[in-house]
Image (cartoon, grey):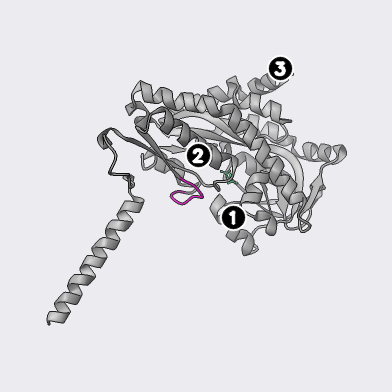
């Protein structure tokens, strides 16, 4: 009996310890350094994202953390959770709105379900080069798009960049006809779905985190992504044919829970916006650099085949995708497309 009671007692203690540990991991109050002074005044920003640390978004999150913590003299702490370890692309916006986390940086595409006007930035072949991309993400159309976040009680801070999307596949996709019947993973987005339907492919929406296993299980033949995302997740080990199509952009909206934002002193709000302003050009340059360096590594890997689109082939892709513009106008019926085209025209 004595042994039974002691055993039960120990089991209960272990169960309570395990339960508390899990609660701690999944609750919003994450561990902090309790030797610090003035803990009551410390502000923690839990920043969740889905990609690796060595990517344009991963290093931007780290830089943001360093700047904010330094400028606030440790009053603000930024806790970063990369690789979808807390939330994935499908549930991070909801978690943000519920203030379970305070900051995320989802791709524009992933916001289009909630804010359909954002699809304008996902139209294929609309932005031609890095110069245009940088100007557009810092331009007036992007500012108006960010303001739309007010309607869903989210604070839009800025856009970060990852560069142009390429096609990575298990067999070559160079000619536009080679998309036919291919199961192409895409981010959940109406306009991306339309894009792959126009290419006669079979679009499959998955989270970024599920893509690797999808490829391993042979459920997917191809995807569109930036070189840095392909390289950092080692997708090229399975999708070893990469076509440098530069057909679309991949950019991030950097956003915060609005109630949390409003609860911050103006001084802290300024530290956050100043930090983001200060690192903006750096972020764009690092994104370009990542894609160049990672591409050069892939070019040096004899198992990976890289293809360029010649002018004629690119024209055929553009022609095949042209109807997507009327699809956009029919469904969105908004001024954003004209605004964006005008803005791009003015970039010299
Ligand atoms: C993807 O899902 O392919 C990317 O959006 C991941 C990311 O956040 O860069």
User: Are there few (<14), some (14-19), or many (20+) residues within 10 Å of tag 1?
Assistant: some
Chief secondary structure of the magenta portion: loop
158 w.r.t. 315: above or below: above
Left or right, residue 206 beside residue 5: right
Q: Which residue is mark 3?
A: 346
The reply to whether dot 1 and dot 3 touch (C-beta < 8 Å) is: no
Q: Which of the two labelled residues, at mark 2 and mark 1, occupies the earlier sequence position?
A: 2
Give the Cα distance between marks 2 and 3.
Answer: 34 Å
How many numbered circles does the render carry? 3
Lower sequence index among marks 1 and 3: 1
**Residue bearing the label numbered 2:** 62
Between the residue at mark 2 and the residue at mark 1, the CA separation in whole angstroms equals: 25 Å
How crowded pointer 3 is (Cα within 10 Å; few <14, some 14-19, many 20+) is rated as few
The answer to if 85 sits in the magenta stretch is: yes
Disc 1: which residue: 211
> Tag 2, which secondary structure?
helix
Per the image, label 3 sits on a secondary structure element best described as loop
Q: Quadrant of residue 93?
A: top left
Q: Is residue 180 magenta?
A: no
Q: Nearer the viewer, mark 2 or mark 3?
A: 2
Magenta part of the chain? 81-87
- Is residue 200 at all visible to an observer of this figure? no
Residue contact between numbered discs 2 and 1, judged by CB atoms under 8 Å: no
Is ligand 1 less than 8 Å from the beta carbon at label 1?
yes
């Amino acid at each position: 009996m004595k042994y039974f009671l002691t055993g039960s007692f120990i089991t209960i203690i272990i169960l309570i310890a395990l339960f508390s540990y899990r609660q701690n991991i999944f609750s919003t109050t994450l561990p902090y350094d309790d030797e610090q002074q003035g803990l009551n005044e410390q502000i923690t920003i839990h920043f969740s994202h889905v990609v690796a640390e060595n990517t344009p978004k991963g290093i931007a999150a780290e830089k943001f953390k360093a700047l904010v913590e330094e400028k606030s003299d440790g009053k603000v702490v930024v806790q970063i959770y990369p690789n979808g370890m807390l939330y994935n692309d499908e549930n991070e916006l909801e978690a943000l709105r519920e203030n379970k986390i305070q900051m995320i940086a989802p791709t524009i595409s992933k916001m289009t379900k909630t804010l359909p006007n954002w699809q304008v930035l996902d139209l294929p072949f609309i932005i031609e080069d890095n110069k245009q991309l940088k100007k557009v993400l810092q331009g007036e159309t992007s500012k108006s798009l960010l303001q739309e976040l007010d309607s869903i009680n989210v604070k839009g801070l800025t856009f970060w960049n990852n560069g142009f999307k390429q096609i990575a596949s298990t067999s070559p996709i160079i000619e536009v006809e080679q998309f036919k019947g291919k199961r192409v993973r895409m981010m959940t987005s109406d306009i991306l779905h339309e894009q792959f339907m126009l290419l006669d492919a079979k679009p499959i929406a998955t989270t970024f985190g599920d893509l690797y296993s999808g490829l391993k299980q042979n459920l997917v033949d191809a995807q569109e992504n930036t070189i840095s995302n392909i390289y950092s997740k080692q997708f090229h080990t399975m999708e070893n044919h990469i076509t440098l199509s530069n057909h679309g952009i991949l950019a991030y909206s950097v956003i915060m829970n609005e109630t949390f934002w409003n609860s911050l002193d103006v001084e802290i709000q300024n530290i956050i916006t100043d930090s983001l302003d200060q690192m903006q050009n750096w972020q764009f340059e690092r994104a370009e650099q990542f894609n160049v360096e990672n591409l050069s590594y892939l070019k040096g890997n004899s198992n990976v085949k890289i293809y360029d689109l010649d002018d004629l082939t690119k024209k055929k892709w553009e022609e095949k995708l042209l109807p997507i513009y009327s699809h956009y106008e029919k469904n969105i019926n908004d001024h954003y497309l004209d605004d964006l085209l005008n803005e791009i025209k003015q970039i010299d």
